[in-house]
């Protein structure tokens, strides 16, 4: 199951996250290899920083800490589950012009869990249109159907 909710965060909150993200990327100029903060693209250089992922941004900047516990997001999750527990966060960068493609996959295998009452929450900092390769969801994939049984549906 998935939900897409618009305008939970105000435009000023999104802009603040963009500024912080730009600062993270600029700071990667001083990072020669993957570390506790950054996963870097193979083409990363100190002159041309190319960040694949920022690990636990909510522990590294107050803007991301606020976003991780945003009242609008928490309210939606409480409506769905009744209680909310924050586990971890990451900022995946999908930059134009470089980077490894992210093939079709299910996130289920990437979350350490013992039950299935969990949700992944994504905050899109940029517009997501077909032209810039947004995340897509295959209807029925949450039911454990094989790839032969399901087909992507395009808008």
Image (spheres, rainbow, N blue to C red):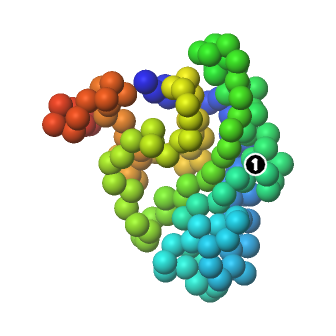
Q: Where in the figure is residue 70, as x and y percent of width and height?
A: 74, 32
The answer to whether 40 is drawn above or below residue 53 in the figure is below
Q: Secondary structure at mark 1?
A: helix
Q: Residue at x 34, y 54 (%)?
A: 103
Q: Is residue 89 visible?
A: yes
Residue receiving disc 1: 58
The number of numbered discs placed on residues in the rendered structure image is: 1
Rendered residue at 71%/29% (across/down):
85
Instruction: Give residue 45's position: percent from left, percent from top.
Output: 58, 84
Residue at the image position 49 percent from the left and 63 percent from the top = 95
Q: Nearer the viewer, residue 48 or 114?
A: 114
Along the horizontal axis of the image, is 13 left or right of 119? right
Q: Residue furthest right?
A: 62
Q: Residue furthest left?
A: 148
The answer to whether residue 72 is visible is no
Quarter of the image with the C terminus in it: top left
Query: What residue is rendered at 67% in x and 71% in y?
Result: 35
Position of residue 109 in the picture relative to residue 47 (left or right): left
User: Which corner quadrant holds the N terminus?
Assistant: top left
Height in image: 8 above or below 26? above
């Amino acid at each position: 199951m998935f939900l897409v909710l618009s305008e939970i965060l105000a435009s000023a909150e999104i802009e603040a996250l963009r500024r912080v993200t730009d600062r993270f990327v600029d700071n990667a100029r001083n990072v020669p290899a993957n570390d506790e903060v950054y996963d870097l693209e193979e083409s990363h250089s100190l002159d041309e920083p190319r960040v694949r992922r920022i690990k636990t941004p909510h522990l590294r900047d107050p803007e991301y800490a606020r976003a991780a516990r945003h009242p609008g997001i928490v309210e939606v999750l409480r409506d769905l589950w009744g209680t909310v527990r924050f586990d971890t966060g990451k900022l995946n960068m999908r930059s134009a012009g470089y980077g490894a493609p992210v093939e079709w996959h299910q996130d289920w295998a990437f979350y350490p869990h013992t039950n299935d009452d969990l949700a992944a929450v994504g905050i899109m900092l940029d517009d997501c249109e077909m032209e810039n390769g947004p995340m897509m969801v295959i209807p029925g994939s949450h039911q454990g159907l094989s790839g032969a049984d399901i087909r992507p549906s395009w808008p």
